[in-house]
């Protein structure tokens, strides 16, 4: 199971940061890297509804925002589907928040100020993992359906034999 560059660049990404300069920097960086579906919000209260509507492959989430911090956003996202893979990379300038964010469900973190090569690499790696996770889930569903169909055929065959 491989993920193509096209699949990675076509993945949907949401940037959540209350600082317009950070949003613009990340939008520009991702656009220049070839990502096609990048959106953003500076309002953390919108994230849950946006993710319900768009099922983002990746959310870049600032932790320190007024009104609703990144930890509260992750908690809200976790309520969408508790068993699902939460596709969040947190953005933080606070080293002490990294471990707490990972424990809260984030899959990775990017330190501020941004190292642009690191940002691109972590995003690409996380998207590859996310897309592989989705392909694996689809493959598992297909296998489960196949097992159910074969089981039904076997039971029908046993009934005919009796």
Image (cartoon, helix red, strand yellow):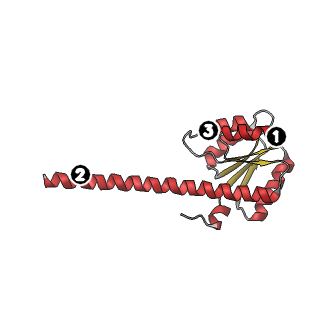
Camera-nearest label, 3 or 1: 1
Q: Which label's residue is closer to the chain start, 1 or 2?
A: 1
Residue neighbourhood size for the residue with mark 2, other residues' Cα within 10 Å, grouped as few (<14), some (14–19), many (≥20): few
The image's mark for residue 31 is none
Front residue of 50/28: it is: 28
Q: Is residue 45 visible?
A: no
Figure check: 137 above or below 5: above
Nearer the observer: mark 1 or 2; the answer is 1
- Mark 1 lies on residue: 94
SS of the residue at dot 2? helix
Measure the alpha-carbon separation of dots 2 and 3: 40 Å
Task: Find residue 155 and name its label.
Answer: 2
Q: Residues within 10 Å of mark 3 (few under 14, many from 20)?
A: some
Please name the residue shown 59% across and 39% down the image: 80
Q: For the residues marked 1 and 2, what is the alpha-carbon distance in whole angstroms?
A: 60 Å
Report if residue 44 is visible in the image: yes
Compared to residue 125, the image places residue 91 above or below, namely above
Of callouts 3 and 1, which one flags the residue occurring earlier in the amino acid sequence? 3
Rendered image quadrant of residue 27: bottom right
Image location of residue 136, percent across then percent down: 51, 55
Residue depicted at x 22% and y 53%: 156
Residue 49 spot, x, y in % from top left: 65, 41
Asked whether 44 or 131 is in front, the reply is 131
- Residue denoted by label 3: 78
Q: Secondary structure at mark 1?
A: loop
């Amino acid at each position: 199971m491989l993920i193509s560059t096209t699949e990675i660049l076509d993945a949907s990404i949401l940037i959540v940061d209350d600082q317009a300069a950070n949003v613009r920097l990340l939008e520009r960086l991702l656009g220049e890297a070839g990502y096609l579906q990048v959106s953003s919000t500076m309002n953390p209260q919108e994230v849950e509804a946006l993710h319900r509507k768009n099922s983002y492959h990746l959310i870049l989430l600032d932790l320190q925002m007024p009104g609703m911090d990144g930890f509260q956003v992750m908690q809200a996202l976790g309520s969408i589907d508790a068993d699902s893979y939460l596709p969040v990379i947190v953005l933080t300038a606070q080293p002490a928040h990294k471990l707490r964010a990972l424990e809260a469900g984030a899959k990775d973190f990017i330190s501020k100020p941004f190292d642009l090569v690191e940002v691109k690499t972590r995003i690409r790696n996380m998207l590859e993992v996310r897309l592989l996770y989705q392909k694996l889930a689809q493959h598992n569903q297909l296998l489960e359906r196949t097992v159910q169909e074969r089981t039904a055929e076997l039971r029908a065959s046993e009934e005919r034999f009796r």
